[in-house]
Amino acid sequence: MNPTTTTRNGKLPLDVLTEIFPHYAAEETPQHPTETLLPICKSWHVAALAKHSIWGQFAIQIGHGSDTEMILRRTETRLKRSGDVSPMDIKLRNIVDIDPNAPKIMEVFEDHQPRPTPAAKCPTMVDKKSRWKKSCTCERSAYECVENILILLAGLDGRHCARWRSLILSPRTSQQHVRSDIGIVGDGRIAQMLLYPMPRLISLSMHTFMDKFSSGEQIFPHVPSLTHVVLSDCMISKIPNAKNLVLLGISFKSLIISGAWYKEQVWRTSMPRLKVLKLNCPRFPLSCPENFPQLRTLELRGERFPMYEAYTYTPLLHLSHLSLGIEGTLLLESLETSIPESLKHVKSLRLWYGGRFLFMNSSDDILLQLVRFLRLMSGLELLEGDIIMLSIVIKLIADPPESVSDLQLFGGQEISFRLSPGGPLWKLPSPSAQEDVAELASRLGVIGLQKSWRWVLK
């Protein structure tokens, strides 16, 4: 058969199939892995095996009751099919105890990577006869499976690590650091795999990593191509390839790990090319802003802006996008006092309600601080947020309380508004009449202007 022509039975040419299959492989799921291409027909089988690059993608999730032996066998087979030179993209997650209600800030960090679906609860958790809950061993099994798969994907003496292009690694679930069955650290097998050179690695996203390694050793010691890094509750001694990073995301839940970062001065390194910084660590001090001369996007979730006091007045000259998950007035106040000049250059601002903001302070304190903060942003062009924060801002424009009535919001410039996520843009003209603000509130779908401040804040 000539593979460049169609035949009477309507088969697609080989070159067309090899163009289609990578798109299928990129969207594979545990229910529909790339291997489902093989039994369709002989021509598909041949075309799929001939395209080595589709077998270099490893999307592995290990949950309650997962068949770890089958996962290992499939991974080994796929590794052989990928050949010796194809780049490897690895997503290796333990999802046994993932919290479906946890903040989704890491979903933003990982850009196009979807948040994994929580695994079903283990059927052995309840004894049907005694109705007593049993201890589930799936977490230990999943952790050991992650270890074994990573060793397999690294290869003998790390020979496959030179092919790694992207790595998403979550050896433990978010609650595992407080569990006693495995302990606070692993046996070092995972860390050992991360000591090999990875010259092609571009993107790294690592979650709940607490594996022990020898003093003086640094994981990811040779990753010259690395530009995107996300670290969530990771015990490390140094940020890998900091001088070449473009995006960095940091998140902490564990006080043990954040304390270790502080003690080891992990932040004390220059990041001259960093353009995007995303932080979910409200009580953690950030290194001086001189370390981020190219920073353009700053995303913060927490109670305050984590910056050392000695450097509070050094501006971030290129800052143009600011995103805030507000959990108290301290965040706005600390930004106002630490980088007031930088706020004047911000063009887009995103605000979302952090969950405690409205219950920690008096209403006058909240509104006064918010007005003072917004007035600093003389270059603002776009304001987007969730329904709670946009309701407060729109209400401030239309009906400012007496305590802030003499303070003009936004300095009189024209602002576009958008309800997150992905709502349409609506402009508020300047100057604006009460009818303009009412129409804006209606189009955005926020709380009506006729509601009292007491009602809005509750």
Image (tube, rainbow, N blue to C red):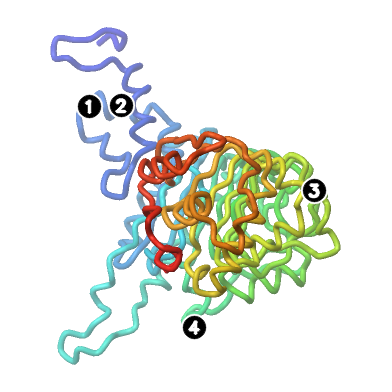
- Sort mark 4 into few (<14), some (14-19) or many (20+) by Cα contacts within 10 Å: few
Cβ–Cβ below 8 Å for labels 4 and 2?
Answer: no
Q: Earlier in the sequence, mark 4 or mark 2?
A: 2
Q: Which residue is mark 3?
A: 315
Q: Secondary structure at mark 1?
A: helix
Q: Earlier in the sequence, mark 3 or mark 2?
A: 2
Which dot marks residue 42?
A: 1
Q: Secondary structure at mark 3?
A: loop
Q: Is residue 162 left or right of residue 100?
A: right
Q: Secondary structure at mark 2?
A: helix
Task: Specify whether residue 340 is in view.
Answer: yes
Q: Secondary structure at mark 4?
A: loop
Which dot marks residue 180?
A: 4
Q: How many marks?
A: 4
Residue 436 position within the rendered picture, expressed as x and y whole percent measured from the top left:
44, 39
Cβ–Cβ below 8 Å for labels 4 and 3?
Answer: no
The residues bearing labels 4 and 2 have C-alpha atoms spaced at a distance of 49 Å
Task: Specify whether residue 246 is in view.
Answer: no
Q: Residue at x 33, y 17 (%)?
A: 16
- Sort mark 3 into few (<14), some (14-19) or many (20+) by Cα contacts within 10 Å: some
Cβ–Cβ below 8 Å for labels 2 and 1?
Answer: yes
What quarter of the picture does the C terminus occupy? bottom left
Q: Nearer the viewer, mark 4 or mark 2?
A: 4
Please state which amino acid type lies under the numbered disc 1. Answer: Lys
Residue 262 position within the rendered picture, expressed as x and y whole percent measured from the top left:
74, 69
Q: Nearer the viewer, mark 3 or mark 2?
A: 3
